[in-house]
Structures are given as C-alpha cells and as structure tokens.
Amino acid sequence: MKLKLIIVFCLSVFSVSSQELTQNSASVDFKIKNMGFNVDGFFSDVKIATNFKSNDLENSYIKGVINVTSIDTDIKKRDKHLLTADYFEAETFPFIKLSSKKIERKASNKYLLTASLTIKKTTKTIVIPLEIIESANSIAIKSSFSINRLDYEVGTSSWVLSDIVKIQINYTGNK
C-alpha cells in the first residue's frame, strides 16, 4: 500500500507536460563539519522537474524531490542513524521537497530562485543563487548555498556538529 501511495505521489508531482524538460541527471551533495572535520555526503535519489525558459521567467518553475533514504555519507552506520527520529525521521518524512515561487534574472546566466523548502514538517522560504546555461537542446543548472539544519529540526544543537550545511545541486536535462 505504501508503495502505491509513493508511486501515485511521484506521478502527480512529476507529470510531464509538453514543455517540461527531460531529466538526464541530478545530484545533491552536502558538506557539514563534525568535530572540526568536513563530512561529505550526497543523496542518490533526486528528481528535478523544470520548464525553465529564460524568456518567460514568470511561467517557469523548478521543483525537486529527494528521497531521504538515499543519503550516503560513506559510513552505513551513520547513514542509518541519520534516518532515525534523531535527524531526518525518514519513516514519517521520507522526502525533502523544493518548489519554486519566483525566478529572477540577476546577470547573463545568473538567477535567484525563491522557493519553498520542506524538510520534515518544516517549510521555509529560501532564496538561492542559480547558474543556468541553456542551449537549443539542453539546460544545465548549478547552485551552491547553505541552510541551518536546526531551522528544519534536523538534529539538535551540538558542540561537535555544525548547524550549517553546505549544499551543491547540479542538474542537466534535455529540452
């Protein structure tokens, strides 16, 4: 039953219109300091949908869904702990979601994305920089930004674990 609900949810979120781009690849990498050392990780199950058109920003959108259980920090025991109620509470909140509200051009290939970011039960509006390169047949989107994990109740305040998580998103798609 859960699988059916997940499939229905994914199909409704990513129903393809004639203008939507076909995803080739998407990645979300992150970095956080733990005991003064960088811990690198990524999510392997990332879906991004967009109909981005630089000449029609008002009607353009970017949406993303990350399956939290796809987290990989190269230490399976740590990954398993991150999925518990101590951090992501993946059984209750299996997805991280991003949905654009507004896209603004700042320079030639530079944009600002205002979006809703939902992690666990918390949704906040964030503004993140984007670099977008379009060609006749494809699009590439890159973004680097930081969030405070405590804003989304991911873990608790700690002397050893940084509150700030650095995030890198890369996406390529065919038009």
Image (cartoon, rainbow, N blue to C red):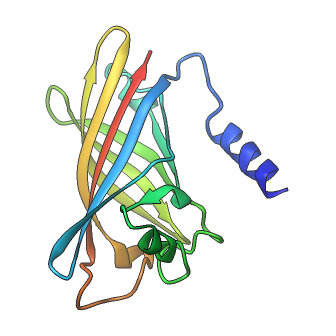
Residue occupying the point 50% across, 22% down: 22
Q: Could you tell whether 162 is left or right of 57 in the image?
A: left
Q: Residue at x 45, y 55 (%)?
A: 116
Image-based side of 129 in relation to 84, left or right: left
- Extreme residue in the right direction: 1
Q: How many marks?
A: 0
- Above or below residue 18? Residue 28 is below
User: The C terminus appears in which quarter of the rendering?
Assistant: top left
**Vertical order, 86 against 143 (above or below):** below
Q: Residue at x 51, y 55 (%)?
A: 70
Q: Is residue 169 above or below residue 96?
A: above
* x then y, percent, for residue 163: 27, 78
Residue 76 at x, y percent in the picture? 45, 67
State the image coordinates of residue 77 (x, y, percent, origin top left). 46, 74
Which quarter of the image is occupied by the N terminus? bottom right
As drawn, the residue found furthest toward the top would be 136
Q: Please give left or right for residue 101 compared with residue 34 in the image.
A: right
Q: Is residue 85 above or below residue 90?
A: below
Please tell me which residue lies in front, 74 or 92. Answer: 74
Toward the viewer: 126 or 56?
126
Residue drawn 24% across the image and 55% down it:
145
Question: Residue 132 at x, y = what percent?
Answer: 26, 29
